[in-house]
Amino acid sequence: MTHRIWLLPAALVLALAAGCATTSAPATIAETAAKTPELSTLNKLINDAGLAQTLSAEGPYTVFAPSDAAFKAVPAKTMDELAKDKELLKSVLTYHVVPGKLASSDVKNGNTKTVQGANVALAKAGTFVTVEDAMVTQADLPATNGVVHVIDRVLMPPKK
């Protein structure tokens, strides 16, 4: 009888330990983009632009990350230009990055400066968050150096 009393707590400890083993370790913004299936195009472009190291740095950053579907909506000519011009690609990608960690619950209506240097308009109505004309479709993906919000459009910085 006393053996049965010890079996239940031992089984519970093993189950908890197994549960802990499957918990994913905290990831940087770059790693979060890499492991999020709907951000595969963004992940490739981050690497092409040489921004993976920046998005793995301390930060914190908030990234408004265009989904694969958002990139499919960009004209092929524009995607070709981005592929050929690394500085233009960096400019477009850093236009999606805001310094600091901004959870969706912290968004206030108004403009905020991007890492690229131009401002973007943020707005919140209830639980809906927009950046410029893009809607946040998946909010608050946590990262060790900030937060990622998936958006439904690719934002283009204003021409200088």
Image (tube, rainbow, N blue to C red):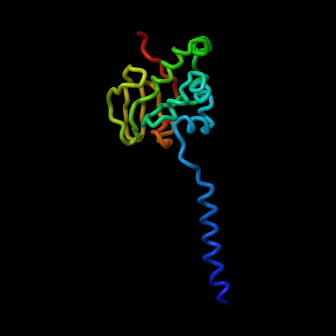
Assign the N terminus to one quadrant of the image: bottom right
Percent across and percent down for residue 155 are 48, 22
Query: Residue at horizontal 59%, vertical 54%?
Result: 23
Left or right of 70 on screen, residue 160: left
Q: Quadrant of residue 146?
A: top left
Image vertical order of residue 96 relative to residue 107, above or below? above
Percent across and percent down for residue 4 are 67, 84
Q: Quadrant of residue 31?
A: top right
Image vertical order of residue 45 relative to residue 86, above or below? below
Number of numbered labels in the structure image = 0
Image vertical order of residue 46 relative to residue 105, above or below? above
117, 51: nearer the viewer: 51
Percent across and percent down for residue 160 are 41, 9
Query: Residue at horizontal 56%, vertical 24%?
Result: 50
Query: Residue at horizontal 59%, vertical 32%?
Result: 39
158, 33: nearer the viewer: 33
